Amino acid sequence: MTESMRAIGLYKHLPISNKESLINVTVPKPKVSGRDILVKIKAVSVNPVDTKVRANGDEEQEPKILGYDASGIVESVGADVSLFQEGDEVYYAGSISRPGSNSEYQLVDERIAAKKPENLSFNEAAALPLTTLTAWEALFERLNISADASVNQGKTILIIGASGGVGSMAVQLADLAGLTIVGTASREETISWAKDRGCDYTLNHHQDFQSQLESIGKSQVDYILCLNSTEEHWGHMVEAIKPQGKICSIVETEGKLDLTALQQKSATFVWEFMFTRPLFQTEDMQEQHRILTKTAELIAEDKLTTTLTETLTGLHAENLREAHRKVETGKMIGKVVVGAE
Amino acid sequence: MTESMRAIGLYKHLPISNKESLINVTVPKPKVSGRDILVKIKAVSVNPVDTKVRANGDEEQEPKILGYDASGIVESVGADVSLFQEGDEVYYAGSISRPGSNSEYQLVDERIAAKKPENLSFNEAAALPLTTLTAWEALFERLNISADASVNQGKTILIIGASGGVGSMAVQLADLAGLTIVGTASREETISWAKDRGCDYTLNHHQDFQSQLESIGKSQVDYILCLNSTEEHWGHMVEAIKPQGKICSIVETEGKLDLTALQQKSATFVWEFMFTRPLFQTEDMQEQHRILTKTAELIAEDKLTTTLTETLTGLHAENLREAHRKVETGKMIGKVVVGAE
């Protein structure tokens, strides 16, 4: 007989105000094989990707389970698993193409999971994987910034949206890499949060970028990381990027873009999508295991801190709907986590 | 009294069929200062950028002199020049923002010039600078491909437009770097030329890319260099690029592009514009001196060959109009050079 488990899922893609948008369901408990580990979930976090997947799509035949950030305990391992054993405490983001973490148990490929930071609680750890992987891949892989701070002396990065989930990690990582950081933030509390994470300067993304950059003596920057509307900030980025500079964005656009505006500067535009590796099963997908392992070390050494700001206790539909509501405001500082207990 | 010199220029931006499109003029002979060298021109080459600048723009008050590829002899040097002396034989592309090489003498910043390959004639050397700088910067800087062939084993590049001026150099450089090269070419003579330069495979860019790539077992490639219509090939490139792959183009678009189509793959798009360094006077503009110097060494070692295919003798308006006509057909194989004598 198939064992079952509790989960939070959806059949219809609905606005979060609708109680049917996320519901408690019972589904079969998955079984491990190959390189998968089965994890008993202790905490999950909610990201903008959850709200996008929840709000868009056709009716589902089986309950669709969201959740792309988790911490938990390894319950069992597949025959080909070599990185983990039963009882390990782990954290990971997972894959957009598999059932998510909003459930009692979840399968995840060992190559994209890591042991959770020893000095963090499950709640604190669950806030980290998706945003850290995104920020890390964006800075050190897509923008190809050196992790060696001595190489980056005098280099400046503009981070558009410095106080959100990814921004809060990107600022910390860019600071460790020795970059001068200009972050955008527009409210007193987000400015203060961004500066506490390591921003050297902040500017208001609702006002003219160029005059604000000039006022701090940074009329052009070496790198831009866009964590906010790519379309709205396209013109600002084209103007602010140095010749031969690099722009990375994580926010898709509805319309087309004037890419040729970057031609004279021989500038680079690169996307960071954290799910590229697990989605395409790239040869280097185990890099995500390495990044999360390195992150755990940096956390243990107090060089990085968790960005958890709000915790809801009890992994059920009502709390997840509340977390989705908070993320959908677009005004979250740091991260919201839903703990199992 | 100001000395004068002969040059080929234009007042009106006209179709090449109009005899006024390029005319013989007499203009003041320029004087050196700073880091400029004054070069007596021995040969020039014509590139697509010449025909674009010639065809577009408002009426000029002074004769506008085109020409962005030259070889010649240093006639005199500015007070701050340290890389050259009188009598040196040099080659360079120059800057889009200064008077071009279609004249008896030309000023060029020493940081973007180099000594010409010793084993090449002035005509053979004049065919090289713009296309080599473009191909080199595209491959080794914008796409960040290693020059170390052992690193590139198993990596594939698709070069769209493999038999033209830039393509002919890009294929040779990619071959030196140990990449597997798929080049597009559609005529018997361009296919043969591209293969002789180092293409491992060719495909016809007027037919479906994907099925042709699959037929050679290369359904996705690590790098794409687009030397042909970026707009026309956008969809092909989106499909053919590997997850985390990189696309470089040198051809501007009239319309906007669906950049978000590259998001899921976390792919890179980067422009190569050879004039970025001289135009913005970037701190690293002397890299162009270094690239052309290295190119001269590779030519001397027979690792690279000139791409000169047609020579016209006599640097006057009639020959330059003929060279522009040839370039405007879009069917040039290699390069056309106009020699001073």
Image (cartoon, coloured by chain):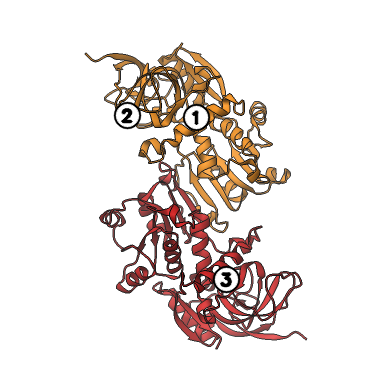
Chain colours: A orange, B red
Disc on res. B38: none
Disc on res. A80: 2
Q: Callout 1 environment at 10 Å: few (<14), some (14 to 19), or many (20+)?
A: some
Looking at numbered disc 2 in the image, what kind of residue is underneath it? Asp
Give the farthest residue toward the right.
Answer: B1
Residue A169 spot, x, y in % from top left: 57, 31
Share a chain, discs 1 and 2? yes
Q: Secondary structure at mark 3?
A: loop
Task: Residue B107: name its quadrant.
Answer: bottom right
Q: Left or right of A35: which side holds B22? A: right
Residue A157 spot, x, y in % from top left: 62, 42
- Cβ–Cβ below 8 Å for labels 1 and 2? no
Which chain does tag 1 point to? Answer: A
Residue placed most toward the observer, B269 or A175: A175
Looking at numbered disc 3 in the image, what kind of residue is underneath it? Ala
Residue A10 spot, x, y in % from top left: 35, 22
Which chain does tag 2 point to? Answer: A
Task: Residue A333: name its quadrant.
Answer: top right
Residue placed most toward the observer, B115 or A250: B115
Q: Secondary structure at mark 2?
A: loop
Residue appearing at x 40%, y 61% in the figure: B159
Residue tagged by mark 1? A293
**Is residue B99 visible from the viewing direction of this image?**
yes
Q: Is residue A122 above or below residue B219?
A: above
Residue tagged by mark 3? B93
Q: Callout 2 environment at 10 Å: few (<14), some (14 to 19), or many (20+)?
A: few
Distance CA(mark 2)–CA(mark 3)? 57 Å
Q: Is residue A9 above or below residue B75?
A: above
Number of the front mark, 1 or 2: 2
